């Protein structure tokens, strides 16, 4: 079973977004919109990062417990998934890596627009 990573969907708000998706708490539902990208009253950056670290730890445990990365799991009902589709653990992990890299790229674009420094080229 791949439930901890089945949300498929990393500093500040992106950590909350990634943590929520990897924790499978950000399926289409109220509260999973723009608010996941800003600290809300009473939240701290330390708490958001700690949540991300906890989700990563649980995902590591889950992956280590799988008999094979070919193990499959049905995808949740969502308009962007074919009805009855499933992904292997390998597909889920590759998706998490891709999503993380994409979000890191977004953060880098914002940073470059603020400080003008280029990390590559």
Image: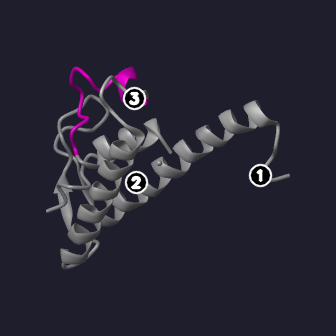
Distance between the alpha carbons at the discs numbered 1 and 3: 27 Å
In this rendering, would 90 be left or right of 102?
A: left
Q: Nearer the viewer, residue 68 or 32?
A: 32
Determine whether label 1 and label 3 are within 8 Å by CB.
no
Residue at image mark 2: 96
Tag in front: 3 or 2: 3
Highlighted range, magenta: 24-37
Quarter of the figure that contains the N terminus: bottom left
Q: Going by the image, does 119 lie left or right of 39? A: right
Find residue 119 and name its label.
1
In this view, 80 is above or below 90: above
The correct choice, above or below, for 85 with respect to 109 in the image is below
Q: Could you say which disc has been placed on residue 93 in the image?
A: none
Badge 3: few (under 14), some or many (20 or more) residues near its Cα, within 10 Å?
A: some
Sort mark 2 into few (<14), some (14-19) or many (20+) by Cα contacts within 10 Å.
many
Q: Residue furthest bottom?
A: 67
Residue 64's spot in the image, x, y percent? Answer: 24, 76
- Are there few (<14), some (14-19), or many (20+) residues within 10 Å of tag 1? few
Kindly identify which residue carries mark 3.
39
Overall secondary structure of the magenta section: loop
């Amino acid at each position: 079973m791949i439930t901890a990573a089945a949300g498929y969907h990393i500093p500040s708000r992106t950590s909350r977004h990634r943590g929520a998706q990897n924790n499978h708490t950000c399926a289409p539902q109220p509260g999973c919109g723009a608010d996941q990208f800003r600290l809300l009253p009473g939240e701290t950056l330390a708490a958001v990062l700690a949540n991300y670290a906890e989700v990563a730890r649980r995902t590591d445990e889950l992956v280590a417990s799988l008999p094979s990365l070919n193990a499959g799991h049905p995808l949740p009902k969502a308009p962007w998934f074919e009805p009855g589709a499933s992904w292997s653990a390998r597909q889920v992990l590759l998706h998490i890596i891709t999503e993380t890299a994409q979000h890191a790229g977004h953060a880098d674009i914002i940073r470059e627009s603020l400080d003008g420094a280029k990390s590559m080229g």
